[in-house]
Image (cartoon, rainbow, N blue to C red):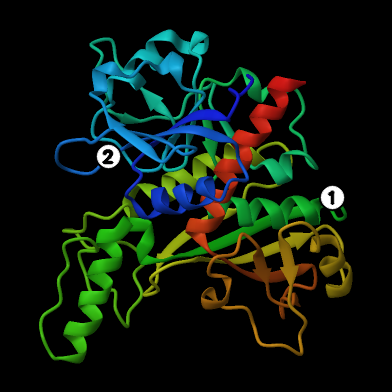
Amino acid sequence: MKPGKEGYRIAVVGASSLLGKELMSILEQGKFPVSRLLTFEAEDGEPELPIIDLSHASAAVVDDGQINEAELDFTFLAARLKELPSFLKSWHQKGNAARSLVIDLVGDGLVVDAAGDYPGPAFGADDRVGIPFLDHRFPIAGLHTDAAHIHISAHPAVIAISSLMLRLAARFPLKSAVAQVFCSASESGSRGVEELQRQTVNILSFQSVPEEIFGAQLAFNLLSRLGKSGKGEMTTLETRLHRQLHHYLGGRVPVPSLRLLTVPTFYSVAVSLYVETAERVTTEAATAALTGERIKVRKANLDAPTPVEVTGSSDILVDSISHDAEHPNGLWLWAVADNLHLAATNAVELAASLREQARA
């Protein structure tokens, strides 16, 4: 695939979502060549489809039916869909013969049934999970990503866990792992962030708290699962992370046991990872194995990294590594990342990687 004279033709589905806005910001920084940018709203209400020519700052509104997937180079999915727009249905019907490459940031692929309906996301055998900065160093044997039907940009928690485990395993054999993922309100989108804010204000003013998204009080609290009336994305996220970790790590390192917790932070993701090595490993050796692209390990004489300080960064900050008190071969790692920025950055890097493959 080669770009036009001024860049690639790109569609962003869910451009007004938190993740979509972050993705748009990165695209508009100009590091990835874009000639035309089409945005499609996946929120409730009538869809709007403005095509924006970034070089001339002009815009024109078109109907969904006027969009041909063959006119697009990349389509980014930045929000969950209740139904597929026409150009994506056409893309799905063409299968691997479709021209546009679809990069999914929020689900596990797309499946359309025989009637042409879209029942929801589903992980397909031909779908590929991508983490470009890891793929270059730890390629998956026999995998041809350019043949994938849909390219799944890994969730930030999967990126963090995979980065830590693959780098450790490259130096020391791993026996087992357990990961606890601390998810922020932003995993449920702007409505989740708004509800956490309202809960905080209402608690401090001694009023009842809204529970539409989380189904329970999240402010000044911690949830192992959503309440029965919750409508957030947390109910499906754990399954999504399990699938991605199995797909990306399976056969290379032990797939970690996983537990998700929702915490009262607005943005970011944090991971508490326990790994057990075949032989005892010093913390100095483990630190040396981890240090590299995108990972920064904090020294023990400094404060532990927090979600606040990773805002706007694609780095994964890791606290000083410690041994488990009861298991001499066990190591504890604490890592934090900006979930929105890391997810958007990874998606754009995935598109750039696919572009380079096409040129080769």
| Residue for point 68% across, 41% down | 132
To which quarter of the image does residue 337 belong? bottom right
Q: In the picture shown, does residue 265 fall above or below 87?
A: below
- Estimate the x, y position of residue 306 in percent, counting from the top left: 56, 78
Q: Amino acid at mark 2?
A: Ala
- Front residue (pair 147, 218): 147
Residue 353 figure quarter: top right
Q: Residue visible at 29% across and 15% down?
A: 113
Q: Position of residue 61 (x, y in %)?
A: 26, 31
Find residue 263 and report its image quarter: bottom left
Which residue carries the number 1 mark?
A: 170
Q: Residue furthest front?
A: 56
Check disc 1 and give the amino acid type.
Answer: Ala
Q: Is residue 175 visible?
A: yes
**Local crowd size for mark 1, using a 10 Å CA cut-off: few (<14), some (14–19), many (≥20):** some
Nearer-the-camera pick, 164 or 338:
338
Left or right, 163 with reference to 278: left
The answer to whether the residues at label 2 and label 1 have Cβ atoms under 8 Å apart is no
Q: Quadrant of the C terminus?
A: top right
Spot occupied by residue 38 in the image (x, y as percentages of width and height): 38, 33
Question: Does residue 104 appear to the left or right of 135 in the view shown?
Answer: left
Residue pointed to by mark 2: 42
Across and down, in percent, residue 222 comes to 36, 75
Return the mark for residue 34: none
The N terminus sits in image quarter: top right
